[in-house]
Image (cartoon, rainbow, N blue to C red):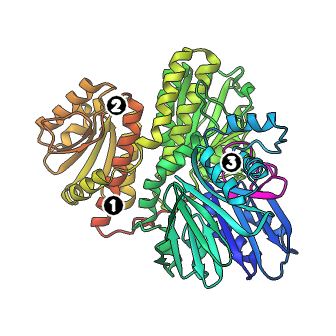
Amino acid sequence: MCGIVGYLGEKNIKEILLGGLKELEYRGYDSAGIAVLNNDNFSIFKAVGKLVNLEEKTKDFTTQGFSIGIGHTRWATHGKPTELNAHPHIGEESYVVHNGIIENYAQIKKELENDGVKFLSQTDTEVIVHLFEKNLHTLKDPFKAFEKTINTIEGAYAVLLVTKSKDDTIFFAKNGSPLLMGKNQNDKFFASSDTPLIGLAKEVYYFDDGEYGYITREEIKIFNNKNAKTPTYKELSTNKLSAQKDGYRFFMEKEIYEQTTVIADTLLGRVTDKEIIFDEIDAGLFEGINEIKLCACGTSYHAALSASYLFERYAKIKTSVEIASELRYRDAILTPDTLFVVISQSGETADTLETLKMAKKAGLKSLAICNVDNSSMVRLADATILTRAGVEKGVASTKAFATQVSVFWMLSLYLAQQKNTLSQEEIKQQIQLLREVPKVVKVDEVLHERIKRLSKRYLHGHGFFFIGRDVFFPLALEGALKLKEISYLHAEGYPAGEMKHGPIALADPELFTIALLPKHLLFDKTKSNIEELSARDSTICVVSSAEFEKADDYIHINPRNHYMLEFFEMMVALQLLSLEISVRLGNDVDMPRNLAKSVTVE
């Protein structure tokens, strides 16, 4: 997930581009860059890390008169966060910025290298600018060259390209990644979302997939499959907060819907056809390791519990899970053959950070699973895997949990590769399943509407049981936590098989049971546990692809061919259920009482 901006006009282009990138920094802050064409001269600036580093580099840069420019803020996918890998990418006399993934970049790159092109970066994006210039050399027409380039590349993209051969023009294309254009008199703007354009443009046009074209001072040309199109503009909101929500009622709702994108970003560059690759960690990290100890708090703890099932099932390595606030104050035995893994959205969670210091002092190797580069945990740990969830504004975590579990699934397979605990064919099958996850978590509007209507029946009673078995037990814990956090209703997560050992005494019509019933993992056992609750007249809502005749309510998920795909689809259903119950109760979904986004004190 990256952010792009563009501007054509006579205003202060540096301030417009940097201001736009500031509004989009939530989409990526590994690196940032701008390229400006003014008076037939290109000026380019790039910086690694937060946008303030780019602002410092450009503090003395000024322009006069008409300029065109493009900018980009990046989450690293292909290639590490370096200045060479930062956008914009350069050809001989052209620059490009890109959000998305070019699926056939390897083939294009090989062909260009055979033609003598020298690549400076490790990114997929750089092929766009070199392919454009190759086409320009033969076609002698910038727009035809751009059109041929867009017709050649495959994948998801929002692209802005500027070239000296047409120094009053910005070329654009959109397919699968967000892009919109704004205008105000002679000024024209591009961005990945509304917010960079508020206060600059009065009306905007949202590009559809497959559209491409160019803008100049005098004209705007939009095409789809070579057919010209007349844009229909919409008035731009003047409320930045509302615009940041992209039409959603709450940031939490937006972030649930974003999970399809951020999981795809998390997989990028790490999943090939036949193996899992983590360039950011040294394979030697796991040498001499006989146990993995996972340590976290809250939602991250539930992700860690999920990981323990995957590590032991696929990598056949002993795994334990610790609540950070407990580990800190007990006489824990930490041995050098243990890899200590901390999990945190912010990388600043106080208790978890202190356990990492304990582990370092005891001489353990350490790994951080984190969403924020350069955070305290990332700086302290021996190695880091970033989850690429982007900024999460809702206090109740959604997409951070989704990306953490995605990383752990990949990491369990990475370890299985190293230890040869799964065959090559089994690894390939798992990889195919992983690639389905972004599609699985894409919110079904019909499902959301069904849950919205269902939620009105769950506003009273004396509590909720969320139950599941195996990896669905941590998911039950997470579902209960989400409901507690934003609805203020009492909810507990339990292993389904544990109900008969005491909790079932609470069962009655006013006890709501949310039962996770996967078709591909312990189906009969879990079904039997649900029937025990049904016999005690508990009100039961089953989440499953299989019909359950004794359920009072039923949230139907799509039939899947693996339990982890069921896991991710059930995750979305539980998030939506908590959201809609909270909305009906009139609560502040994004800022629940008594809670903070990052817990930086004990």
| Residue 273 marker | none
> Residue 372 vs residue 507: left or right?
right
- Residue 415 spot, x, y in % from top left: 61, 24
Residue marked by disc 2: 469
Q: Is residue 81 shown above or below 194?
A: above
Q: Is residue 600 visible?
A: no
**In the picture, residue 316 is in which quadrant?**
top right
The residue that appears at 66% across and 62% down in the rendered structure is 171
Viewer-nearest residue: 574 or 417? 417
Q: Dot 2, how many residues are within 10 Å of its Cα: few (below 14), some (14-19), or many (20+)? A: many
> Residue 176 vs residue 519: left or right?
right
Q: Dot 1, how many residues are within 10 Å of its Cα: few (below 14), some (14-19), or many (20+)? A: many
Q: Mark 2 and mark 3 in contact (Cβ < 8 Å)?
A: no
- Of the image marks 1 and 3, the number of the one nearer the N terminus: 3
| Residue 76 marker | 3
- Residue 530 spot, x, y in % from top left: 21, 34
Residue type at mark 3? Ala
The question of residue 92 being in magenta is answered with yes
Residue marked by disc 1: 487
Q: Dot 3, how many residues are within 10 Å of its Cα: few (below 14), some (14-19), or many (20+)? A: many
Under circle 3, the secondary element is: loop
Give the dominant element type of the magenta stretch: helix, strand or loop: loop
Judged by depth in the image, the label closer to the viewer, 1 or 3, is: 3
Name of the residue lying farthest toward the bottom? 185
| Quadrant, the C terminus | bottom right
Range shown magenta? 73-95
Q: Mark 1 and mark 2 in contact (Cβ < 8 Å)?
A: no
Under circle 2, the secondary element is: loop
**Distance between the Cα atoms at labels 2 and 1?**
25 Å
- Of the image marks 2 and 1, the number of the one nearer the N terminus: 2
